[in-house]
Amino acid sequence: MTVSTYTVLGLETSCDETAAAVVRRGPDGGVDVLSSIVASQIAAHAPFGGVVPEIAARAHVENIDAIVARALADAGLGFGDLTGVAATAGPGLVGGVMVGLSFGKAVALARSLPLVAVNHLEGHAVSARLAADLDYPFLLLLVSGGHCQLLAVDGVGACRRLGSTIDDAAGEAFDKIAKTLGLPYPGGPALEALAEGGDAARFTLPRMLLGRKDCDFSFSGLKTAAARIAEGLTTHAERRDLAAAVQGAIANQLAERSDRAMIAYALAHQGRSLRFVVAGGVAANRAVRTRLEATAQSRGFSFTAPPLAYCTDNAAMIALAGAERLALGISDPLDAPARPRWPLDAAAASSKPTHIPGRKGAKA
Ligand code: KG4
Ligand code: ZN
C-alpha cells in the first residue's frame, strides 16, 4: 500500500531547545502543523552567558518524554496514528542530538515506523513551507546562531552553497555584542528590544568585505569595533544607539550579500520564478526582515519568511523535512549516526571550506 498522507512526529534537541511536533503532509503536498511544543532551556544556561553542552544534554533527557507526550496530546493523536518519525541527527551539540535521535529510533523500532535522520539545516530550509505555499526552487538565506549561509535550494536535500560566513554566524555576532552591552543570553532578541527607537547614525561601524565579489559574510570586525565602543559608554541612550547601529550594520551586510547572490541566482534562473527565503533565528529580527524584503523586491524576487515561532529552533520544521523525504521514499536505518558536523552542501564544504575544517571535516 502506498501512503500518500504522512503524519510525522518531529524531534529537535540539537541545541538548547527540547522540541517535539506533529506535522501532517497531504497527498497534494499541503502541510498541517497539528502541534508544536518547544521547551526552552534559556533559564538553565543564562547564568553562564551561553549554552553549556552538558547541561543541555541532561535537560533534554529530563524533558523529552513529557514534551513528546504534550505534542501528541495537543495533536489529539497517539503513537499508533503516526506514519513516521523524524529526528534531528546533526549538526549540533552531539550529547543533545543523541537524546532526540535515540528517542526517535526507539519510537520507530517499537512502532515499526520509518525513521528519518534530519539535517537541522534542512529543517530550517523547509521552515518557510510550514505556513506558506512556497515551491522549489528558491534562494535561501539561513541565518541562525551557528550558521550564516546563502544556498540555492533546488528541492528536498538538493542545496548548493553560494556563500557562507568566514568567521562568526550572524546570530553569534548578535549574541556576543549583546553580551558586551550587558544584555542577557540569548542576545539577539534582547539587542533588538534595546535598539527600539535608537539613533543608528550616532556610531560609525566598519562595513565588512565591501570590496569582495563573492557572497561570503564576516562579522568579527564589527564585533571588535562594537566591543571597543561599548566599553566607553555610560548612558542608556548611548547603549540604545549602539544597539541600533549594530543591528543596522548586521542587517546591511545580510542584505548586501543577499543582493549579490540574487543577481547571480537570477542570471542562472532566467525565465523562472525568483523566490527569496530567509530562515533561522535571526530571521525573527524585524530590522533584518524589512531590509531583506526591500532587497528582494528591488531584484524582482518574492519574499518569504517563516512566522516568528518557526524562525528559531522548533520540531515542526524537522517533522516537515522528514515528511518530505518520506514522500520521496527516503528513510534512514536505525543505526543512523548522530553527526556533530554535517554540511548541507558537502561538496562545497570540502572543496571551499570557509571555516578551517576540524578533525572530522567541515562543520558548515
Ligand atoms: O535558529 P536558532 O534558534 O538556533 C540555531 O540553530 O542557531 O537561532 C538562534 C539565534 C541566536 O543567536 C539568537 O540570538 C538569534 O538567533 N535571534 C535573534 C533574534 N531572535 C533570535 N537575533 C536577532 N534578533 C532577534 N529577534
Ligand atoms: Zn537552528
Image (cartoon, rainbow, N blue to C red):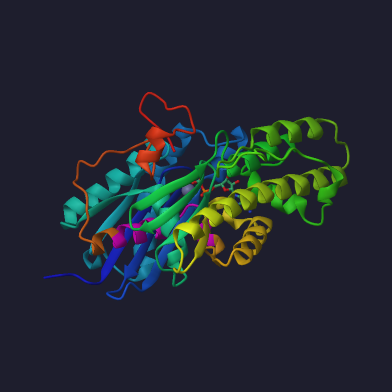
Split into 4 quadrants, where in the image is the N terminus? bottom left
Residue 147 visible here: no
Split into 4 quadrants, where in the image is the C terminus? top left
Q: How many labels does the image show?
A: 0
At 44% from the left and 46% from the top, the residue drawn is 161
The picture places residue 124, in percent across and down from the top left corner, at 45, 54
Question: Is 293 in front, or is 74?
Answer: 293
Q: In this view, does 299 lie to the left or right of 339?
A: right
Q: Is residue 329 left or right of residue 302?
A: left
Q: Does the magenta stretch include residue 320?
A: yes
Q: In this view, does 318 lie to the left or right of 297?
A: left
At 44% from the left and 54% from the top, the residue drawn is 152
At 17% from the left and 53% from the top, the residue drawn is 110
Q: Does the magenta stretch include residue 319?
A: yes
Q: Magenta stretch?
A: 309-324
At 30% from the left and 69% from the top, the residue drawn is 77
Residue 142 visible here: yes
Q: Quick one: which residue is furthest to the bottom in this view?
A: 28
Quadrant of the image occupied by residue 168: top right
Question: Is 228 in front, or is 273?
Answer: 273
Question: Is 223 in front, or is 187?
Answer: 223
The picture places residue 68, in percent across and down from the top left corner, at 35, 56
Question: Is 209 in front, or is 229?
Answer: 209
Q: Quick one: which residue is furthest to the left in this view?
A: 1
The picture places residue 91, in percent across and down from the top left corner, at 40, 40
The picture places residue 293, in percent across and down from the top left corner, at 62, 63
